[in-house]
Amino acid sequence: MPFLGISFLVVCTLFLFSTQFSVLDATSRIMSENLVIFSPKKFNPQKLRIYYYIFLWVQILMGIVIFSLGMTEPFKLVVTGAILNAFAMFFYSGFLLWLNNTKLNKTLRPSLIRNVFVVCAFIFYGVFSFITITKIL
């Protein structure tokens, strides 16, 4: 039966690696595109590829720093990831509300029901983030 256990760990490792690889790619792409869209005069769209790689390597280096600080216990890593994702979603939903309702043409702006759902998500992630910060401190 050791073969089944090893096979399970190999499949899980490959699955987690491919998932994280996709997340790093997607977040680097989104951040670099938003950087150029938000400030095209300051950040040249022709250098989008460079911005992508900068964001990618900053994320990789942050991961290296986390591991270098001795944070290698799987449960703590999962909890840290969940906390960081909650904060990211809190800020993302707030920025999404602001951008959709101020920067888009009136005909392209989201409907009231969509705004209500994004406001609910913003409140949920904000409360979750606040509770997490108060528990940590």
Image (tube, rainbow, N blue to C red):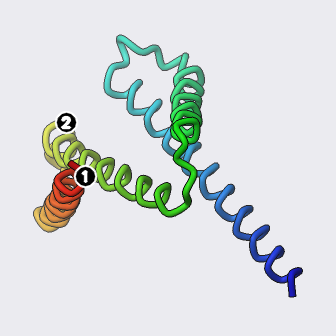
Q: What residue do we see at 37% from left, 53% from top?
A: 85
Q: Amino acid at mark 1?
A: Ile
Mark 2 — residue?
103
Give the camera-side residue of 74 and 21: 74
Asked which secondary structure carries label 1, the reply is helix
Viewer-nearest of discs 1 and 2: 1
Estimate the x, y position of residue 25 in percent, counting from the top left. 58, 43
Estimate the x, y position of residue 33 in percent, counting from the top left. 45, 32
Q: What residue do we see at 54% from left, 17% from top?
A: 46
Residue 31 against residue 116 in the figure, above or below: above
Estimate the x, y position of residue 83 in percent, counting from the top left. 34, 54
Q: Amino acid at mark 2?
A: Lys
Is the residue marked by circle 1 packed among few (<14), some (14-19), or many (20+) residues within 10 Å? few
Mark 1 — residue?
136
Estimate the x, y position of residue 114 in percent, counting from the top left. 19, 64
Is the residue marked by circle 2 packed among few (<14), some (14-19), or many (20+) residues within 10 Å? few
Total count of labels = 2
Q: What residue do we see at 21% from left, 57% from top?
A: 135
Give the camera-side residue of 50 and 38: 50
Q: What residue do we see at 39% from left, 26% from top?
A: 35
